[in-house]
Amino acid sequence: MSAINLAIVGVGKIVRDQHLPSIAKNPDFNLVATASRHGTVEGIAAYKSIDEMLDAEPSIDAVSLCMPPQYRYEAAYKALAAGKHVFLEKPPGATLSEVADLEALAAKQGASLFASWHSRYAPAVEATKAFLASTKINSVHVIWKEDVRHWHPNQEWIWQAGGLGVFDPGINALSIVTHILPKAIFLTGGTLEFPENRDSPIAADLHFRNVDYVPVHAEFDWRQTGKQSWDIIAETETGQMILSEGGAKLSINGELKFSEPEQEYPSLYKRFAEIIKAGTSDVDLSPLRHVADAFMLGKRKFVDAFYD
Ligand code: NAP
């Protein structure tokens, strides 16, 4: 198969930090165009809108959609309708229903749809999944606390409805949890803290369980300064397991078992090429479903206004 002609829509932070370097190193992809109102990539044909780009560049095979989630459905629908394969940045959309509609369209068009979850490709995630499958889990504690001013300075969309607020990083934790636990979990209760001047939460405290009543407690907070926390801790029959640094390191009973360099986005593009070649899609909505459940079941608390 010759290289896949790829286009990017929404040239912003994650495109520059991760997509461009990963695509440049992957011989399966050939970046041919971008569509972005302001962003461009040096040496690559640039258009202001996806309509303009799809009209002008019929050789495009696949499109990576990297704009904020509230604006992704429209572009995804247009790309799939034009017969292109589609890579959705996380979260795959602003609602479950719009992504279900895209899945149906991809199937009808015979195009591949990829709902990417980059944290699932963190280095120690697979080793953690294998460990948890080999033991009895007693409880799980997820601590995902970071400084929003450092990671999302002046990103207005993230605070608007559909931007997910603290669930923008929290959904990364949920994408790992739903991948590594042997049994499905579901929310039993929680509290979401909304700054009084924002439409999305700054913190969430969530309680889940599985069919065997194994408790999973998740704490997401955007007000953490100093050391940042992206840890999943499981108490098991074999002892304490800690998956730390966002999935980079696995320790069991204090002993480091797995730590390798981060390769999340190169792995995502490897997977995207795989599903295109296989003629399939990869859309797991379970992380987004848990977020939707939190908005349905969580108690709301209003806290101090947030200003960048
Ligand atoms: P961003 O830089 O704020 O936005 C990406 C680009 O989307 C912008 O540069 C903008 O390009 C376009 N855009 C913004 N508002 C738009 C609108 N109303 N309509 C159409 N296009 C719009 O955000 P980002 O940090 O790259 O995040 C984008 C997505 O990647 C999010 O879903 C996020 O969760 C995910 N992600 C981000 C990170 C990270 O570290 N930042 C990590 C992993 C995943 P133009 O103005 O040129 O159109």
Image (cartoon, helix red, strand yellow):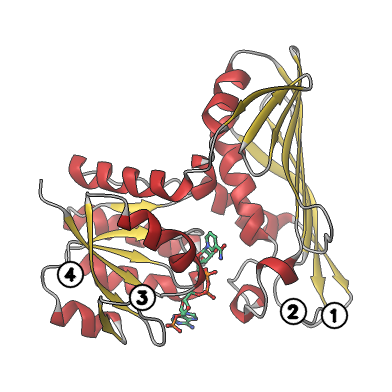
Q: Quadrant of the C terminus?
A: bottom right
Q: Residues within 10 Å of mark 4 (few under 14, many from 20)?
A: some
Question: SS for tag 4?
Answer: loop
The structure residue drawn at horizontal position 39% and vertical position 47%, both measured from the top left corner, is 266
Q: CA distance from mark 3 to mark 2?
A: 25 Å
Q: Earlier in the sequence, mark 3 or mark 2?
A: 3
Report x, y in % for residue 22: 38, 54
Q: CA distance from mark 1 to mark 3?
A: 32 Å
- Residue type highlighted by circle 1: Ala
Quick one: quadrant of the N terminus? top left
Of the residues shown, which amino acid type is indicated by label 2?
Arg
First-in-chain label (1 vs 3): 3
In 3D space, how far apart are the residues under numbered discs 4 and 2 (Cα atoms)? 37 Å
Q: Which residue is mark 4?
A: 82
- Picture quadrant of residue 64: bottom left
Q: Residue at x 70, y 62 (%)?
A: 166
Q: Earlier in the sequence, mark 4 or mark 3?
A: 3
Q: Nearer the viewer, residue 30 or 72?
A: 30
Q: Which mark is residue 305?
A: 1
Give the mark, 2 or 1, whose residue is nearer the N terminus.
Answer: 2
Q: Is residue 2 left or right of residue 231?
A: left
Query: Badge 3 is on which residue?
Result: 74
Residue 148 versus residue 226 in the image, above or below: below
Q: Secondary structure at mark 3?
A: helix
Residue at disc 3, CB closer than 8 Å to ligand 1: no
Q: Secondary structure at mark 1?
A: loop
From this viewpoint, is residue 182 visible? no
**Badge 2 is on which residue?**
198
